[in-house]
Image (cartoon, rainbow, N blue to C red):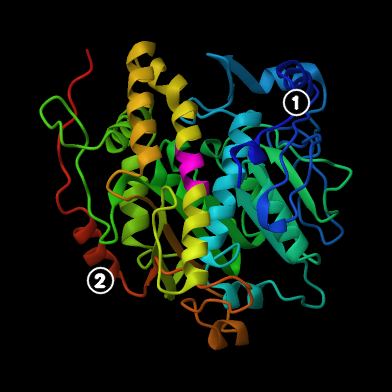
């Protein structure tokens, strides 16, 4: 697949005009995953107006951000990139370049999970149509809206709500009628969503949360009794080769270290300096949800999804080899574009631009040559809110099962941990060899 496959044909002037009017073109992604094309995003749970559905549940937000004035109030321009203006902790861009990166990342994740979500049979049972009840799905940190829209298509009888810090680049003309988007900062609380959703999905928001344990309580409270909570976030350490080994970051004292690891470690340091509870997120999700008083511990699992960065991995099964190489190619693009995305953050905390540019060059060299066979790990944790009474769905399904419905090969580096003891032991093994100290900032 050529690199140009992912490039937008729009000029810089067209992109600026489209953003001001709430529009942004998204390239059609691979595998026919039914991405929506450009358009206007809307809603915002920070608005003062509120309406009720026919069944009396609050929709909370009806205010639409459609004008050029509204768009500029929600974002700011920093070093040529568009950044949200609502949350200081989340400092990654919200522009066409970033949206394309996130959609590539999404496709790789779907390939790894074998679908849009873990515990597939259980999620499908929870969301099965039921007379007299509206099924609802909440996607927090929805980014481009791609997961939200795909869920709305897979479950057309369900109401699906996506929430993000900035406008979502969707086309309202082709948006599924059961799908809507809201602009909000979840650090401010989610009381307006309490006990309304059958599935709550939170993906890659850890870097934007100030107090992870408190926000987790807010988010879990959005579940209906028996509802499924799904957490998905990144591991801010990289791993290498088929044994998933940790290689320390490059420093002047460790010239054998990894520049890819150095840039990832600097990202973690930068996020911490601006108030992100990234360390809390990592600790809590790796430990799992078994001790959460709201959730049923028998339904809880954690998991690791290791994605190759670059098409270096192979397998005796040609179908699995093709899967690994395609996912790896997508993840390499994700990593190289991601370095561009974190530059404003690194400069914000005080690193000179020329230093950041030099780091980016070194990382991209390693990424291109796939030095030491790098991998990015995603961490997952899921479980169900305790039911008001035991239901057939609760009794008859298993959190650890994987749906057999996807047509692609089973991904080999997706590991599910069925107990807290196993999850903690795996965490101990992963953290072996970590703990080096970064050089102080000048």
Residue 10's disc is: 1
Query: Which residue occupies 57% across, 15% down?
Result: 80
User: Circle 2: is it few (<14), some (14-19), or many (20+) Cα within 10 Å?
Assistant: few
N-terminal of the two: label 1 or label 2? 1
Q: Bin the neighbour count of mark 1 within 10 Å (Cα to Cα): few under 14, some 14-19, many 20 and up.
A: few
Secondary structure mainly formed by the magenta segment: helix
The image quadrant of residue 46 is top right
Residue 421, horizontal then vertical, whole percent:
25, 71
Question: Which range of residues does the magenta coloring cover?
Answer: 330-335
Q: In the shown orientation, is residue 349 left or right of residue 437?
A: right
Quick one: quadrant of the C terminus?
top left
Vertical comparison of 392 with 265: above or below:
below
Q: Quadrant of residue 394?
A: bottom right
User: In terms of depth relative to the viewer, which is nearer, 61 or 109?
Assistant: 109
**Depicted 26 relative to depicted 175: above or below:** above
The percent coordinates of residue 128 (x first, y second) are 72, 76
- Which image quarter: residue 393? bottom right
- Can I make out residue 218 in this image? yes
Question: Where does residue 55 sit, x and y in percent of width and height?
Answer: 83, 62
- Left or right of residue 322, residue 192 in this image: right
Element under disc 1 = loop
Can residue 59 be seen by looking at this rendering? no
Q: Which residue is mark 2?
A: 421
* Residue 8 against residue 162 in the figure, above or below: above
Up the image or down, 249 lies above or below 356; here it is below
Q: x, y (%) of residue 373?
A: 32, 50
* Magenta stretch encompasses residue 334: yes
Question: Marks 1 and 2: which is nearer the front?
Answer: 1
């Amino acid at each position: 697949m050529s690199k140009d496959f992912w490039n937008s044909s729009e000029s810089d002037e067209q992109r600026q005009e489209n953003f001001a009017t709430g529009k942004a073109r998204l390239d059609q992604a691979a595998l026919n995953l039914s991405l929506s094309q450009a358009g206007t995003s809307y809603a915002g749970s920070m608005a003062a107006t509120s309406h009720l559905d026919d069944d009396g549940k609050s929709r909370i937000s009806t205010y639409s951000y459609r004008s050029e004035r509204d768009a500029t109030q929600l974002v700011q321009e920093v070093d040529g990139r568009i950044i949200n203006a609502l949350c200081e902790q989340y400092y990654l861009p919200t522009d066409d370049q970033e949206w394309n990166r996130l959609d590539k990342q999404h496709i790789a994740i779907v390939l790894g999970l074998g679908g849009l979500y873990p515990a597939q049979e259980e999620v499908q049972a929870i969301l099965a149509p039921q007379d007299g009840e509206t099924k609802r799905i909440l996607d927090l940190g929805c980014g481009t809206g791609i997961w939200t829209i795909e869920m709305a298509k897979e479950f057309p009888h369900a109401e699906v709500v996506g929430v993000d810090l900035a406008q979502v680049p969707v086309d309202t003309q082709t948006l599924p009628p059961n799908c809507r988007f809201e602009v909000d900062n979840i650090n401010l609380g989610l009381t307006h969503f309490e006990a309304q959703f059958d599935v709550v999905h939170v993906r890659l928001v850890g870097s934007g949360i100030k107090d992870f344990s408190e926000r987790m309580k807010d988010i879990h409270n959005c579940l209906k009794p028996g509802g499924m909570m799904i957490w998905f976030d990144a591991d801010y350490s990289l791993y290498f080769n088929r044994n998933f080994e940790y290689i320390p970051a490059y420093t002047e004292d460790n010239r054998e270290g990894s520049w890819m690891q150095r840039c990832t470690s600097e990202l973690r340091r930068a996020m911490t300096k601006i108030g992100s509870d990234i360390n809390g997120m990592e600790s809590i999700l790796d430990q799992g949800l078994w001790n959460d008083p709201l959730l049923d511990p028998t339904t809880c699992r954690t998991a690791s999804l290791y994605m190759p960065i670059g098409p270096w991995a192979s397998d005796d099964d040609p179908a699995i080899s093709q899967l690994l190489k395609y996912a790896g190619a997508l993840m390499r693009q994700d990593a190289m574009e991601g370095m561009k995305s974190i530059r404003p953050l690194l400069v914000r905390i005080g690193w000179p631009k020329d230093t950041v540019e030099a780091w980016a060059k070194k990382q991209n060299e390693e990424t291109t040559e796939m030095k030491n066979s790098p991998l990015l790990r995603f961490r997952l944790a899921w479980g169900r809110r305790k039911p008001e009474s035991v239901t057939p769905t609760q009794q008859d399904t298993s959190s650890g099962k994987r749906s057999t419905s996807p047509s692609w090969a089973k991904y080999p580096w997706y590991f599910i941990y069925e107990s807290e003891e196993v999850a903690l032991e795996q965490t101990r093994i992963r953290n072996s060899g970590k703990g080096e100290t970064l050089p102080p900032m000048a």
